[in-house]
Image (spheres, rainbow, N blue to C red):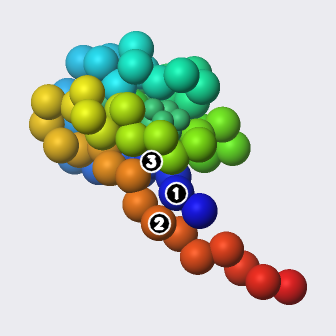
Amino acid sequence: MRKAENDRNRCVACGLCALRCPREAIEIRKGCYAFVDITKCVGCGLCEDACPTGSIKVKEYEVARV
Ligand code: SF4
Ligand code: SF4
């Protein structure tokens, strides 16, 4: 399962990732950082391509088996 994750310490809240996201999964919070709603994210990577600081990255997560 691929999901975007943002490093808030490097994010400059420019909003470019949110503009590119086809799922509207990214919200700029308090004018400070991009928040990713992982329930909407499909891991496409467009936000990562758009980010000028390299703070948002798509990562692979293990899916827990029950
Ligand atoms: S990986 Fe795709 S769906 Fe997920 S937040 Fe980035 S642009 Fe949106
Ligand atoms: S594009 Fe990068 S720096 Fe700009 S708001 Fe998104 S995560 Fe932050």
Residue drawn at the location 47% of the way across and 24% of the way down: 21
Distance (Cα) linking label 2 and label 3:
9 Å
Mark 1: which amino acid?
A: Arg
Secondary structure of the residue carrying tag 3 is: strand
* Spatial separation of the CA atoms under disc 3 and disc 1: 7 Å
Residue 33 shows up from this direction: no
CB atoms of marks 1 and 2 within 8 Å: yes
Dot 2: few (<14), some (14–19), or many (≥20) neighbours within 10 Å?
Answer: few
Is ligand 1 within 8 Å of the beta carbon of the residue shown at mark 3?
Answer: yes
Residue for badge 1: 2
Q: Which mark is residue 60?
A: 2
Question: How many neighbours does mark 1 have within 10 angstroms: few (below 14), some (14-19), or many (20 or more)?
Answer: some
Classify mark 2: helix, strand or loop.
strand
Amino acid type at circle 3 is Ala
Residue 30: assigned label:
none
What is the distance, in whole Å, between disc 1 and disc 2 at their CAs?
5 Å
Q: Which amino acid does label 2 sit on?
A: Glu
Q: Give the quarter the ligand 2 occupies.
A: top left
Give the mark, 1 or 2, whose residue is nearer the N terminus. 1
Q: Position of residue 9 (x, y in %)?
A: 22, 46
Q: Position of residue 38 (x, y in %)?
A: 60, 46
Query: Which numbered disc, 2 or 3, marks the residue that appears first in the sequence?
Result: 3
Q: Which residue in the protein does label 3 denote? A: 4
Quadrant for the C terminus in the image:
bottom right
